[in-house]
Image (tube, helix red, strand yellow):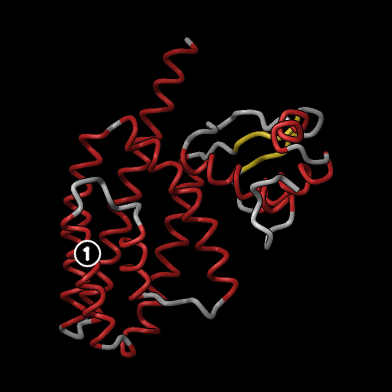
């Protein structure tokens, strides 16, 4: 067991969690090889622990194993990202309808507090905890394990693409930040008014807008790769 690993984690869980965070931060790039020998030496763990860690990353969609070649940080295609957003939209709209009448006044006050907290943040914050907690007010699926697992997988994969987007297009990211905050306000106001149709329209616009921006970024990246290869 690595010395700095939390006692509640197994060795493979600690290795997988560390690599997961590095992938999400962009420290490990799409297509980068995850070499078992290097990982085992880095963490001073067995090969079996590394293999189990890599299987955990594969289950999250963050790593891809290719027979006779090894395991690599997953690359996401535009089609995969569009599919993720379609699934996310379907789940969140379904959850919104299911929970809408049960959203309490206190929950809406908390949602507004979170938005006010985000408004005070001078940094790009649409990937932050306040943003996640705001969305959770409208589609609380904490008791639904399968849905939580699906959304966690989607959010994890999309987050690493957003990190790359912010890194390479900071001015566009800042512009999107302003738009995102405005769309959050629309969703909150619709909920305060008890208008589920308007709330769904606001949520749909928000998710589709994010999908269009991120897929455009991936198209630019693909063009850049093609230009370098030619």
Up/down of 223 relative to 118, above or below: above
Residue nearer the viewer, 82 or 194: 194
Provide the residue designation for mark 1. Answer: 184
> Residue pushed farthest top?
230
On the image, which quarter does residue 9 sit in? bottom right
Q: How many marks?
A: 1
Residue 11 visible in rendering: yes
Residue 57 visible in rendering: no
On the image, which quarter does residue 146 sit in? bottom right
Up/down of 145 relative to 8, above or below: below
Up/down of 118 relative to 158, above or below: below
Q: Position of residue 112 (x, y in %)?
A: 20, 72
Q: Position of residue 221 (x, y in %)?
A: 40, 28
Residue nearer the viewer, 212 or 130: 130
The residue under the point 75% across, 31% down is: 41
The residue under the point 79% across, 46% down is: 49
Asked if residue 135 lies left or right of residue 15, the reply is: left
Asked if residue 77 lies left or right of residue 224, the reply is: right
Residue nearer the viewer, 220 or 30: 30
On the image, which quarter does residue 95 sit in? bottom left
The residue under the point 18% across, 43% down is: 175
Asked if residue 46 lies left or right of residue 80, the reply is: right
Residue nearer the viewer, 133 or 70: 133
Q: Where is residue 109 in the image (x, y as percent from the top left)?
A: 21, 79
Q: Position of residue 151 (x, y in %)?
A: 50, 63
Q: What element carries label 1?
A: helix
The residue under the point 24% across, 74% down is: 199
* Residue neighbourhood size for the residue with mark 1, other residues' Cα within 10 Å, grouped as few (<14), some (14–19), many (≥20): many
């Amino acid at each position: 067991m690595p010395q700095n690993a939390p006692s509640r984690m197994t060795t493979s869980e600690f290795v997988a969690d560390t690599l997961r965070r590095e992938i999400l931060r962009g420290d490990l790039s799409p297509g980068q090889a995850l070499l078992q020998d290097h990982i085992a030496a880095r963490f001073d763990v067995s090969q079996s622990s590394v293999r189990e860690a890599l299987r955990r990353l594969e289950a999250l969609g963050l790593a891809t194993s290719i027979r006779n070649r090894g395991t690599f940080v997953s690359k996401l295609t535009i089609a995969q990202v569009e599919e993720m957003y379609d699934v996310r939209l379907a789940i969140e709209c379904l959850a919104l309808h299911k929970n809408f009448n049960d959203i309490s006044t206190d929950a809406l006050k908390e949602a507004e507090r979170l938005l006010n907290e985000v408004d005070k943040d001078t940094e790009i914050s649409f990937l932050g905890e306040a943003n996640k907690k705001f969305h959770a007010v409208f589609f609380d699926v904490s008791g639904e394990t399968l849905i939580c697992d699906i959304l966690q997988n989607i959010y994890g994969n999309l987050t690493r693409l957003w990190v790359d987007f912010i890194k390479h297009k900071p001015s566009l990211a800042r512009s999107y930040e302003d738009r995102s905050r405005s769309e959050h306000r629309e969703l909150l106001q619709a909920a305060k008014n008890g208008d589920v149709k308007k709330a769904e329209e606001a949520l749909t616009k928000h998710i589709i807008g994010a999908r269009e921006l991120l897929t455009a970024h991936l198209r630019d990246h693909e063009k850049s790769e093609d230009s370098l290869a030619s």
